Image (tube, rainbow, N blue to C red):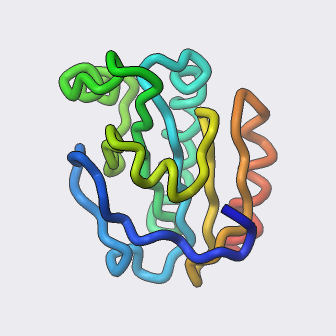
Amino acid sequence: MRLREKIPILTGATSWLNGRVTNSELNGLPTLIHFWSISCNSCKDALPNVNQLRKETKGKLNILAVHMPRSNEDKDFNEVKNIAKQYGITQPIYIDDDLYLSKKMKVKYVPAYYLFDANGLLRHVQSGKGSIRLLEKRIERVLQ
């Protein structure tokens, strides 16, 4: 995806955990879409940071997790559910076993973060092990 592109329609999930979300339910708030995988250690290392962001921005920022499998083993729904519980992921999780949303958003690596403003326009993309601090600064900007 390119900056200023519109948030895609949230269809194509093979299933959902922690509730289902539609675009209309995003309520005109900025939205962070966070891609992760159960086989990704960097993703697991980043999950506490995402949980902290969720707590700090509650009511001001939508956070949606997308589980993007990197192998067939990653498609074990019960394992995704177990890891989500273990790491305290309480936001909705779009299960993308068919890579529908991942391909639509052109995600190549996990963890990946796509930050959309209140108008649903992409404002920041970040992937890999990089510092969460840059993401926090971008979130602060879209919340202003």
Which residue: 72% across, 66% down? 2
Q: Is residue 143 above or below residue 49?
A: below
Residue 109 falls in image quadrant: top right
Residue 57 x/y as whole percent: 54, 58
Q: Is residue 75 above or below residue 138?
A: above
Residue 32 falls in image quadrant: bottom right
The answer to whether 20 appears left or right of 104 in the picture is left
Q: Is residue 111 above or below residue 101?
A: above
Residue 80 x/y as whole percent: 29, 26
Q: Is 16 or 26 nearer to us in this picture?
A: 16
Q: Is 71 or 48 nearer to us in this picture?
A: 71
Which residue: 70% across, 32% down? 128
Residue 74 x/y as whole percent: 35, 22
Q: Is 130 or 90 nearer to us in this picture?
A: 130
Quarter containing the N terminus: bottom right
Residue 28 x/y as whole percent: 48, 82
Which residue: 31% across, 70% down? 22
